[in-house]
Image (cartoon, grey):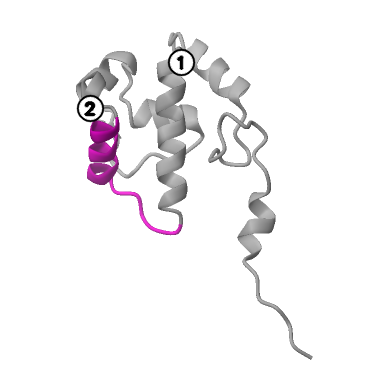
Amino acid sequence: MMTESFDTSMLIRGVSKDPEFPHAPLSWVRGTAQEMADQEGLAMTDEHWEVIRALQDFYERHEGTPIHLRELHDALDEKFHVKGGIKHLFEIFPGGPIAQGCRLAGLKAPFIASDRSFGSVA
C-alpha cells in the first residue's frame, strides 16, 4: 500500500482568521493588537497596519530560519523606502518599528531588537 506524504504545517496553519492579515500567526487577533497599541499610546492608522502585514509576511517567508535583526531592518527600509524608509517607521512606531511592530504583530522580535538601557534600537 502506497501512502501519500504531505506537509502537516498546512493542516495546522489553516485559513487566517482575518483575511486582511493572511500571514498572521494563528493566535493573533487584530483587536488584541489594537488594545495593546491603545495601552502604548499609539493611534493605529492604515500605515501602521501595513507595517504589521509586512512584518507578518516577512516572518512567514522566513519560517523555520532564524530572523536576523539587520535583515529585517533592511527589508523594512526597502519596502517603505518611498515613504522615508526605516527613519519614517521610527516616527510612526516610537517604540521602534521592529520591537514595537513585532509585539503588535504577534511576533517575537529578533535578538537585541530592543535594549532597555538605551531604549529601542530597531
Residue 41 image point, x, y percent: 44, 8
> Which secondary structure is most common in the magenta stretch?
helix
Element under disc 1: helix
Residue beneath the point at 46% across and 13% down: 44
Q: Please, which residue is most extreme toward the right here?
A: 1
Q: Is residue 107 magenta?
A: no
Residue at figure coordinates x 62%, y 41% from the top left:
26
Give amino acid for label 2.
His
**Residue 77 belongs to magenta span:** yes
Residue neighbourhood size for the residue with mark 1, other residues' Cα within 10 Å, grouped as few (<14), some (14–19), many (≥20): few
Which image quadrant for residue 97?
top left
User: Which numbered marker is on residue 81?
Assistant: 2
In-image side of 29 versus 92 (left or right): right
Q: Quadrant of the C terminus?
A: top left
Q: Which residues are magenta?
A: 64-79
At horizontal 22% and vertical 43% (from top left) the residue drawn is 70
Kindly identify which numbered label has been placed on residue 62: none
Residue pointed to by mark 1: 46
* Foreground residue among 119 and 23: 23
Q: Is residue 97 left or right of residue 37?
A: left
Instruction: Give the spatial CA distance, label 1 vs label 2.
Output: 17 Å
Extreme front residue here? 82
